Image (cartoon, rainbow, N blue to C red):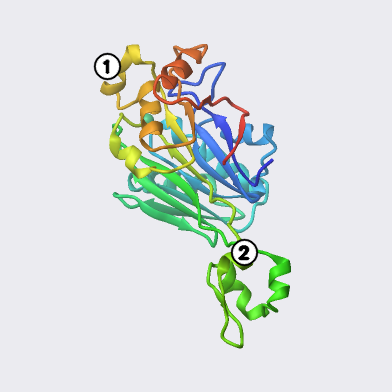
Amino acid sequence: MSDFTLNILGCGSAVPTPLHNPSSQVIDYRGKLMMIDCGEGAQSMMRRMHLPFSRLSRIFISHLHGDHCLGLPGLLSTLSLHEKTGTVVIHLPADGVDIMKRITDYFCRESTYEIIFEPIPDDGGIIYETSSLIVKAFPLYHRVPCFGFQFSEKPKQRHLKGDMAKFYSLPISAINAVKNGEDYITPDGTVVPNEHLTTPPDPSRSYAYCSDTAFDTRVAEAVKGTHVIYHEATYDSSLADDARQRGHSTAAEAGQIAALAQAEMLVIGHYSKRYTNVDILVDDARTQFPNVIAAQEGLTIDII
Ligand SMILES: [Zn+2]
């Protein structure tokens, strides 16, 4: 299993069905858990998938429709029963801060940890950054303010060739610069080209979550070059008018976004309750983009 995975907790749309929970996912990046959307049922799916509450420290909410956020009060309340410590940061559209704060002030008043709400700026942008990962929010085109999220690894360091480092007596003080791609200049002034000392870095991986949205090429621009893209696919193409009216996409439109963004893999979800078998949606998406996976509760996908 890779150290960057996507875990599907729920991939249905507005109404829970015997087959699907409402939207929720957990990114496991090097052991740190970050939740994206929190529909009802998210906390019980975390338990079933053995994703420990103690490692959850950040939650990203795309928009304030109930099927994307009403699991939050229950989850946050449970976290304090598990005597969680530290902080949980919740990134959400600005219109959700007051209402969520009132709920948590009431239900989490004896909380063992701190809850911090971070409103997402209207035009998105970088909302979280570590030494190895950047999370960017970008606007989507739904009936209420709505955002997608892109998780991108920063460029990694080149690999040092141990035998060559020894041959040139590379000092410890020069190693970082060489791993960052610089040439090495020996004490007598000889320039050793970087490619003699290193091999290329591991590729940087990326994932983007495109929540509820009408088809819009600006979404493809926002996620251009992302390796794995999740895109809602509420309907098949025969219901394109319904999709447009309700601020949703068809599976073929999800495929178009993946193709325009030059992604390597498309994961579809947010299925309308009318589909008891999502093969029709997978086939619809594949008319536009070949590498399509249907999200399913309990599924874990390696981010490449
Ligand atoms: Zn919605």
Ligand 1 under 8 Å from disc 2 Cβ: no
Is 139 left or right of 116, judged from the image as shown? left
Q: Quadrant of the N terminus?
A: top right
The quarter of the rendered structure image containing the C terminus is top right
210 relative to 285, above or below: below
Circle 1 is placed at which residue position? 241
Q: Does the closest atom of ligand 1 sit within 8 Å of the Cβ of label 1?
A: no
The x, y position of residue 99, in whole percent, is 39, 44
Q: SS for tag 2?
A: strand
> Sequence-wise, which precedes: disc 2 or disc 1?
2
Q: Tell which of 247 and 136 is nearer to you.
A: 136
Depth check: 116 or 135 in front? 135
Residue extending farthest bottom: 188
For the point 36% across and 28% down, the residue is: 256
Residue 248's place in the image compared with 30, above or below, is above
The structure residue drawn at horizontal position 65% and vertical position 47%, both measured from the top left corner, is 3
**Amino acid residing under circle 1:** Asp
CA gap between label 2 and label 1 equals 54 Å
Name the mark nearer the viewer: 2 or 1.
2
Q: Position of residue 291 (x, y in %)?
A: 50, 27
Q: Which mark is residue 198?
A: 2
Mark 1 secondary-structure assignment? helix
- What amino acid is at disc 2? Thr
Q: Quadrant of ligand 1?
A: top left
